Image (cartoon, grey):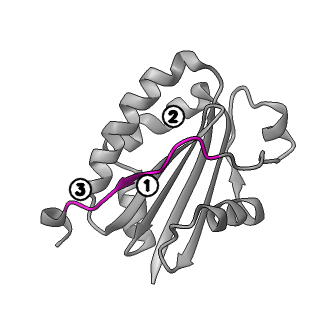
Amino acid sequence: MAHNSITRLRLRSIFSLGAFVRETREISSQLAAAPGFLGGAVLAEGRLVFWTRSAWESLEAMKAFRDSGAHQVSMPKIQDWCDEAAVVQSDGEALADWDAIYALMLEKGRFTRLKRPNAAHEAKRFAKMWRWSPEQPVKPNSKVNA
């Protein structure tokens, strides 16, 4: 059984895209080396919407990652960068099917408090998923997680 953590973020402006991509790369490196990380991916949906999926050995392993390093530094920036942000977590098989992930987000997603949410975020609505590019897998660093 895995603990799955899914995020959906929509950037307010293209001007924050460069910083967002740089920090996403740093977080992906931290993720690959995180104890308990089983696998995951980043998906650029289009329209400045980005998804992440990560599977963990346990909720505690996910929280240890979330609350440390590059991820901990970047989390507060979401308040300024995003006008939509949501997260959903589940236990079971490691999720990799984006249609199932989208359905889970629709059903159980929790919206993050933002400084400048857009109308969709305020209404707790998600646009239909529109995949712009293939996912970018993040694999565990076998030396760390072995």
| Label 2 environment density (alpha carbons within 10 Å; few <14, some 14–19, many ≥20) | few
**46, 3: nearer the viewer:** 46
* Location of residue 22 with respect to 127 vertically, above or below: above
Q: Amino acid at mark 1?
A: Ala
Task: Give how far across and how far down residue 24 sits, in percent.
Answer: 40, 38
> Measuring 35% from the left and 43% from the top, which residue is drawn there?
27
> Measuring 54% from the left and 15% from the top, which residue is drawn there?
15
Residue that carries the numbered disc 3 in the rendered image:
33
Residue that carries the numbered disc 1 in the rendered image:
41
Q: Report, in whole angstroms, how far the alpha carbon at label 2 lies from the one at label 3.
A: 22 Å
Q: Report, in whole angstroms, how far the alpha carbon at label 1 lies from the one at label 2.
A: 21 Å
Residue 76: assigned label: 2
Label 2 element class: helix
**Between discs 2 and 3, the one toward the N terminus:** 3
Q: Is residue 31 magenta?
A: no
| Label 3 environment density (alpha carbons within 10 Å; few <14, some 14–19, many ≥20) | some
Q: Nearer the viewer, mark 1 or mark 3?
A: 1
Q: Which stretch appears magenta?
A: 131-141
* Location of residue 133 with respect to 59 vertically, above or below: above
Q: Is residue 137 magenta?
A: yes
Which quadrant of the figure has residue 64? bottom left
Task: Give how far across and how far down residue 13 sits, in percent.
Answer: 62, 20
Q: Nearer the viewer, mark 2 or mark 3?
A: 3
> Measuring 43% from the left and 23% from the top, which residue is drawn there?
19
**48, 84: nearer the viewer:** 48
Q: Amino acid at mark 2?
A: Pro
**Between discs 1 and 3, the one toward the N terminus:** 3
> Measuring 52% from the left and 62% from the top, which residue is drawn there?
5
- Quadrant housing the N terminus: bottom left
